Amino acid sequence: MGFSLLEVPETEHFVARQEELAEIRKTLNSDDSRQTAVLHGLGGIGKTQLAVAYAKRYKADYSAIFWLNSKDEDSLRQSFARVARRILKEHPLASRLSAVNEDSKLDEMVDAVKRWLDHPKNTRWLMVYDNYDNPKLRSNTDPSAVDLRGFLPGADHGSIIITTRSSQVKLGHRIRLEKLKDINDSLEILSHTSGRKTVQDGEPYPQMLTLH
């Protein structure tokens, strides 16, 4: 099943984070049981792009890769519905999804996809739960907070990546993303973003304005 990035916000260039990529790889390949990597850090620091880079680099190792918007429960249910339709399109005889159709309720689609992922012969999938920034915790009294555990497959196989701003998500091996320390990496990002290669060629930097 192909890897689709249609709904994933992606930048044209991905810079550095090679150590973090290696740590994700080590985490998700430590043994044959289900493994989870939790990428956490400040907003805009590159968690989603790191997950995209991992999925693109190692997509040949997975039979299916699914991307889920985890900002709230409704977004998660809608993501599962899209996953269900995608599976049925490519595998119309999938037994554990045979009862799902366009009229099925979202919770039914969530359960059907989880059953498909739980199949003992379906072990090489990767699920990416992106933007899990409002987790249900004891310290979080927000009624819209999400308990991701209800949306995770139950089987002890497969791979999961979670991106979150919260350092309190303890659903797997946590990998903290810090700000880039290498000035050359920062300049490379700036040059790609601005479209000016000269930023790295020793010519004057673009003028920066300070707003008061």
Image: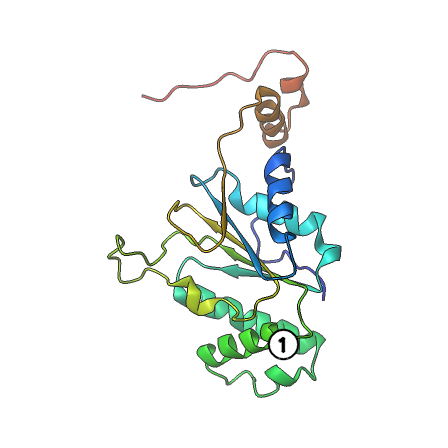
Give the residue displayed 56% in from the left and 75% down from the top. Answer: 113
Provide residue 198's location: percent of width, then percent of height: 66, 18
- In the rendered image, the residue lying farthest to the front is 31
- In the rendered image, the residue lying farthest to the bottom is 99
Give the residue displayed 65% in from the left and 74% down from the top. Answer: 87
Q: Secondary structure at mark 1?
A: loop
How many marks are shown on the rendered structure? 1
| 21 is higher (above) or lower (below) than 83 | above
- Picture quarter with the N terminus: bottom right
Which of the pair 209/37 is nearer the observer? 37
- In the rendered image, the residue lying farthest to the left is 141
* Colour theme: rainbow
Judge the density around disc 1: few (<14), some (14-19), many (≥20) Cα neighbours within 10 Å.
few
Quickly name the residue at label 1. 119
Provide residue 27's location: percent of width, then percent of height: 60, 49
Rendered image quadrant of residue 127: bottom right
Which of the pair 13/167 is nearer the observer? 167
Provide residue 88's location: percent of width, then percent of height: 65, 78
Q: Is 99 on the left or on the right of 152, as rendered? A: right
| 82 is higher (above) or lower (below) than 34 | below
- Give, as a three-letter code, the residue at label 1: His
| 116 is higher (above) or lower (below) than 187 | below
- Picture quarter with the C terminus: top left
Give the residue displayed 68% in from the left and 76% down from the top. Answer: 89
Which of the pair 182/175 is nearer the observer? 175
Q: Is residue 82 visible?
A: yes
| 112 is higher (above) or lower (below) than 168 | below
Rendered image quadrant of residue 100: bottom right
Give the residue displayed 58% in from the left and 61% down from the top. Answer: 34
Q: Is 207 on the left or on the right of 5, as rendered? A: left
Q: Is residue 10 visible?
A: no
